[in-house]
Amino acid sequence: MHRILRATAALAAATLVLTACAPRTTVTVPYTQDEATVPVGGTLVVDLGTVSSSIGDAWALTTAPDPTVLGEGSEHYAAQGDADGAYAGLTWEFEALAPGTTTVGFTYSYRGEAGDPEGRTQDPEPLLVVTVTG
C-alpha cells in the first residue's frame, strides 16, 4: 500500500514539475494586424515598430483590453544603439487570462500631435481584436 502511495505522490510531483516547466506561448503580431489568437496563459506581444522620443515619436494605449480576458499590459523598449535619443523597438505585452474576445487599440503621435500628420506610420490608430482560447 505504501508503495502505491509513494508512486502516486511521485507521479503527481512529476506532473507538477513538467507543467511548471512547459514553455509559455508567445504570439507576436505587428500593429497593422487586425486579429490575433492567444491561448490562456500565453502572452500577446504587439510590435509597434521603432520609435525615437528625441524626434517626438510616441504610441499610447487608447483602448484597454477587457481585464477579465487580457492583463492590463506593459510597454517594453529595446534600444537599438547607445546614443541618447537612439531609435528603440517598442512592444506592448499582454497576458492572456481567460477565454474570450476583446479589443486593444493604440494611437500614434508625432511631436505631441495625435494621429500621424507626417505620414510616418501605416496605421496611426490601429485596433486589434484578440481572441483568447481555453
Image (cartoon, rainbow, N blue to C red):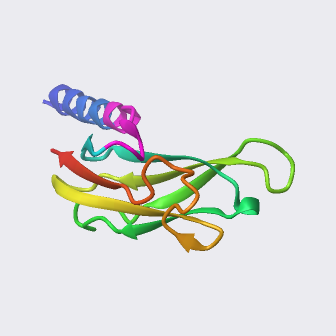
Q: Quadrant of the N terminus?
A: top left
Q: Estimate the x, y position of residue 98 in percent, counting from the top left.
A: 20, 55
Q: Which residue is found at the position 26% from the left and 59% from the top?
A: 103
Q: Which residue is found at the position 74% from the left and 41% from the top?
A: 80
Is residue 126 in view from this perspective?
yes
Q: Quadrant of the C terminus?
A: top left
In the rendered structure, the answer to whether residue 22 lies left or right of residue 133 reads right
Residue 19 magenta-highlighted: yes
Q: Which residue is found at the position 78% from the left and 50% from the top?
A: 86
Q: Nearer the viewer, residue 41 or 52?
A: 52
Q: Estimate the x, y position of residue 108 in percent, counting from the top left.
A: 51, 62
Q: Which residue is found at the position 37% from the left and 38% from the top?
A: 27
Q: Nearer the viewer, residue 17 or 49?
A: 49
Residue 81 magenta-highlighted: no
> Which range of residues does the magenta coloring cover?
17-33
Q: Estimate the x, y position of residue 12 in percent, counting from the top left.
A: 24, 35
Rendered view: 2 above or below 74: above
Q: Estimate the x, y position of residue 78 in percent, counting from the top left.
A: 66, 46
Q: Nearer the viewer, residue 5 or 125?
A: 125
In the rendered structure, the answer to whether residue 71 lies left or right of residue 97 reads right
